[in-house]
Image (spheres, grey):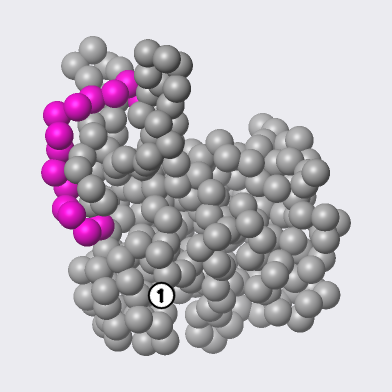
Amino acid sequence: MRIARFTPPVDREGQRSSDPIFGIVGRSPEGEDTVLKITGDPLYAGINPTGEVFALSDVRLLAPVIPRSKVVCVGRNYVDHAAEVGGEVPAEPLLFLKPNTSVIGPNDAIVWPRQSKRVEHEGELAIVIGRLCKDVPREKASDVIFGYTIANDVTARDLQKSDGQWARAKGFDTFCPLGPWIETELDPSDLAISVTVDGELRQNSRTSLMVFKVPEIIEYASAAFTLLPGDVILTGTPGGIGLLPPGSSVSVTIENIGTLENKVISRG
């Protein structure tokens, strides 16, 4: 099941509501992509369809989740990426945080900050946590996962190197695109993941090449942090990271989920 967060179509006066709602992405008998409105936030209220259906092309998709607490990220979780940034694969998952204010949705703009001269893409599989949990053993990890979405761990690479830690370089507003929806029924163990910039293939790998798999990441992260419904965990990026010039368009595609696309603009 694909759960989207969106604003509904424009009304008769040509206005679009600013109030986000949730829905189930599907297809009509005529083959049209649709979204079926549900009541409330499915992370807290369950999935309760209202019967109201919109054409997917008529709505504006938003980030499928806005973490109320945190975005937890795993660094250097693919051997080829660890090598390209000049680091070793860690013995344990290397965790860092992005603020929830960095989250944007599909088709929103990634804003190149004035402080950086090199902003780069990192396409990643993202886990959405479904319930409050702590100290989750890896064999129980699936019990706390609501679903999966696509992320771009946008990074100011020059600031990452100069600062000596990663909070600013990875935490700017707009540096965590998520979307286009949450897939609740997915085996994450071996999915194709790719990134293109203006149509040029930059990253091309599979989640089976992650050093630390999803159950291990859940176990390790939940031993450190209490995880809350709506928390997001980014599982790391494969090799092939590269520059995101202002004016470019970046797309992250993950098999059986979809494609997350964003434009890049300079901060005025």
- Counting from the top left corner in percent of width and height, residue 11 is at 37, 19
Note whether residue 253 is visible. Answer: no
Q: Amino acid at mark 1?
A: Ile
- Counting from the top left corner in percent of width and height, residue 132 is at 26, 74
- Identify the residue at image location x=49%, y=50%: 178
* 156 shown above or below 166: above
- Identify the residue at image location x=23%, y=31%: 36
- Identify the residue at image location x=53%, y=78%: 95
Which residue ends up furthest to the front in the rendered image? 13
Q: Is residue 169 left or right of residue 214?
A: right
* 234 shown above or below 42: below
Note whether residue 143 is visible. Answer: yes
- Counting from the top left corner in percent of width and height, residue 94 is at 55, 79
Residue 49's quadrant in the figure?
top left
Q: Quadrant of the C terminus?
A: top right
Quickly name the residue at label 1: 217
- Identify the residue at image location x=35%, y=81%: 226
Which residue ends up furthest to the right in the rendered image? 117
Q: Is residue 118 left or right of residue 79?
A: right
Few, some or many residues within 10 Å of mark 1 (<14, 14–19, 20+): many
Front-lying residue, 91 or 38: 38
Front-lying residue, 36 or 185: 36
Q: Is residue 57 left or right of residue 241?
A: left
Q: Is residue 89 magenta?
A: no
Tag 1, which secondary structure? Answer: helix
Q: Is residue 50 magenta?
A: yes
- Counting from the top left corner in percent of width and height, residue 229 is at 30, 66
Q: Is residue 125 left or right of residue 110?
A: left
In magenta, the rendered stretch is 43-57
Residue 128's quadrant in the figure?
bottom left
